Amino acid sequence: MTGVEAEPAPGAPLTAEALGPGLDTAWLGRALHWLERTDSTMRVASELAGRGAPHGTAVIAEEQSAGRGRLGRSFHSPPHANLYVSVVLRPTPPGLLAPTLVLAAGVAVAETVAGWLGAPERVDLKWPNDVRIDGKKTSGILVELASDAVRPLFAVLGIGVNLNVDPASFPDEFRERATSLAAASGASVDRIAFTRRLFGTLERVLDLHGTLGFAALRPRFEAWFRMRGQAVRVLEPAGRTLEGVVRGVDPDGALRLACRDGGELRVLAGEVTLLREARA
């Protein structure tokens, strides 16, 4: 025996015991529920929040049978390969649960992925919730809000990051437009180290968002947002389809589109499809 601690295997479980010793957070993940398998970490975290789970409580699963994405879409969740986590957020400070929460979380994920990859030019944010490497999705982010008649009670922030999954194993509908950090970097990812790094960055970003709002994060968001000038089609939750050229993102998180008739639209939510490369 040399006395040197062995490196964890890429698929080593993301338990509280594994993550805790090197976790650089004050509140995020300090209460952590680990599950070998569940239908959805979002469901589990929401139920825990409804029973009073504190701010920052995290639920991590090694596998999800019904992982959820935005607009009711599924999130491919094979076992012991990636990161599937949902975090309970309480409305303290008051700005934490603003509609721009999903964009703020995207900043944290993009910075963590780019830092791990060591090639920030390969990483971008696709509005509103996808982090991509080389134009292929590697992470999705979901926010679900619970409110009473007067105010928001809590939010559940869900993050899925493709770390070690082989893109060849993706279902047909994902294979051409998704990747993993291991596939992009050519090396397996230490999931424990990545999760610790993400939690630290995410906590600092959420604290800033809660106290100073999205305005304090907007320059960092813009560094990853490369959709400006691109023609897109947007399917809104109500079923309406819009087309236009991306002008930018407003302070409240809305996507701004220039229309063919010279007008402009603001989109608050929807599924975006890129129609062609950015215009000069």
Image: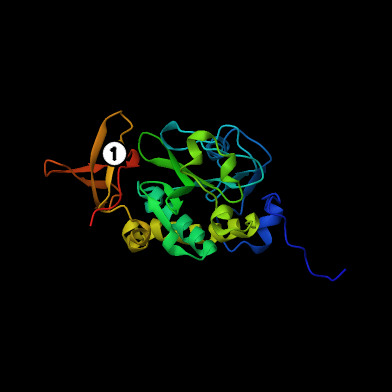
The amino acid type found where label 1 is placed reads Arg
For the point 41% across and 34% down, the residue is 71
Q: List x then y, in percent, for residue 266.
A: 23, 43
Task: Report helix, strand or loop for mark 1.
Answer: strand
Across and down, in percent, residue 181 comes to 55, 54
Q: Residue furthest right?
A: 1
Quadrant for the N terminus in the image: bottom right
Residue drawn at x 60%, y 46% as measured from the top left:
166
Res. 169 in view: yes
Name the residue tied to disc 1: 233
Residue located at (57% from left, 48% from top): 57
Coordinates of residue 249 in the picture (x, y in percent): 28, 52
Q: Which residue is the extreme one toward the left?
A: 262
State the image coordinates of residue 155 (x, y, percent, origin top left): 45, 43
Q: Quadrant of residue 124?
A: bottom left
Above or below, 85 against 222 in this view is above
Residue nearer the viewer, 13 or 209: 13
236 w.r.t. 7: above or below: above
In the image, is residue 271 above or below residue 2?
A: above
Q: Is residue 113 left or right of residue 260?
A: right
Q: How many marks?
A: 1
Q: Is residue 42 left or right of residue 191?
A: left
* Quarter residue 60 falls in: top right
Residue at 44 percent of width and 63 percent of height? 120
- Is residue 94 shown to the viewer in this render? no
